[in-house]
Image: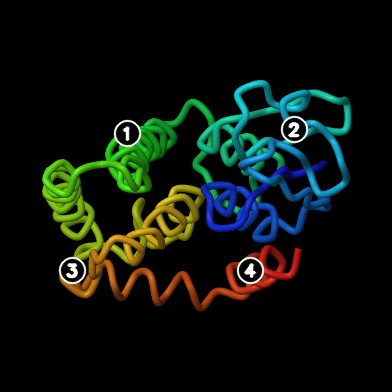
């Protein structure tokens, strides 16, 4: 498999999951501005949507959208228990969690990357995001991970997008449960190796 990635983007999430599962894969770096890969490909030929992550399978199929990719990967090694079994109630809860991260946290942070956005508009987005982080903190005050006691694919995704808060002066120390969660996940060997590999690429 090939994982097309760009540093400091949401492609870190499937990258972490691949390492957690011990699956063989090749990292291919993408320049988000030029849409060229490090090996000279036109990334738009791989993913016409133009963004990472994209996972190219051995049969040539390309899977996009982080929440879909991480569930696909987890199902390749169900014994690792990074995702509940398909068809179970807990799997629905996982999908609920992934959708919340996508629509409320990831999408809530994305506009802040726009340098032309007026400060007043950024404040509106930050205020809404803080309310969502209150909800996340409420969950993490009760459990070590989003779905309970077991690290899973939703945690890889949430960790990835919450790392961006530092770019926008949102201090996660305001939510001790989230700060503790980030420190816990950041200390995992797979997370450290994924970050190191992306920095070195």
Q: Give the label on residue 43, or none.
A: 2
Q: Secondary structure at mark 1?
A: helix
Q: Give the label on residue 190, or none.
A: 4
| First of labels 2, 4 by sequence position | 2
Quadrant of image for the C terminus: bottom right
Q: What's the CA distance linking mark 1 and mark 3?
A: 20 Å
Percent position of residue 166, x then y: 34, 67
Q: Give the label on residue 157, or none.
A: none
Q: How many residues crowd mark 4 within 10 Å: few (<14), some (14–19), many (20+)?
A: some
| First of labels 1, 4 by sequence position | 1
Q: Secondary structure at mark 4?
A: helix
Name the residue located 68 percent from the left edge and 63 percent from the top edge. Answer: 198
User: Eyeballing the image, is 109 above or below 48?
Assistant: below
Q: What's the CA distance linking mark 1 and mark 4?
A: 26 Å
Percent position of residue 161, x then y: 41, 53
Q: What's the CA distance linking mark 4 and mark 3?
A: 25 Å
């Amino acid at each position: 498999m090939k994982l097309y990635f760009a540093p400091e983007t949401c492609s870190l999430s499937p990258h972490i999951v691949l390492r957690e599962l011990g699956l063989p894969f090749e990292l291919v770096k993408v320049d988000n501005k030029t849409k060229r890969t490090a090996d000279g490909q036109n990334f738009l030929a791989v993913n016409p949507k133009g963004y990472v992550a994209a996972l190219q399978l051995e049969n040539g199929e390309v899977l996009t959208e982080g929440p879909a990719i991480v569930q696909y990967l987890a199902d390749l090694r169900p014994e690792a228990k990074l995702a509940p079994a398909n068809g179970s109630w807990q799997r629905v809860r996982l999908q609920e969690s992934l959708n919340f991260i996508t629509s409320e946290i990831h999408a809530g942070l994305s506009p802040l990357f726009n340098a032309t956005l007026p400060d007043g508009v950024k404040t509106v987005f930050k205020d809404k995001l803080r309310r969502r982080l209150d909800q996340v903190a409420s969950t993490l005050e009760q459990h070590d991970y989003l779905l309970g006691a077991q690290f899973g694919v939703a945690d890889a995704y949430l960790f990835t997008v919450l790392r961006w808060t530092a770019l926008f002066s949102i201090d996660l120390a305001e939510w001790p449960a989230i700060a503790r969660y980030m420190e816990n996940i950041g200390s995992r060997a797979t997370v450290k190796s994924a970050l190191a590999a992306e920095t070195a690429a």
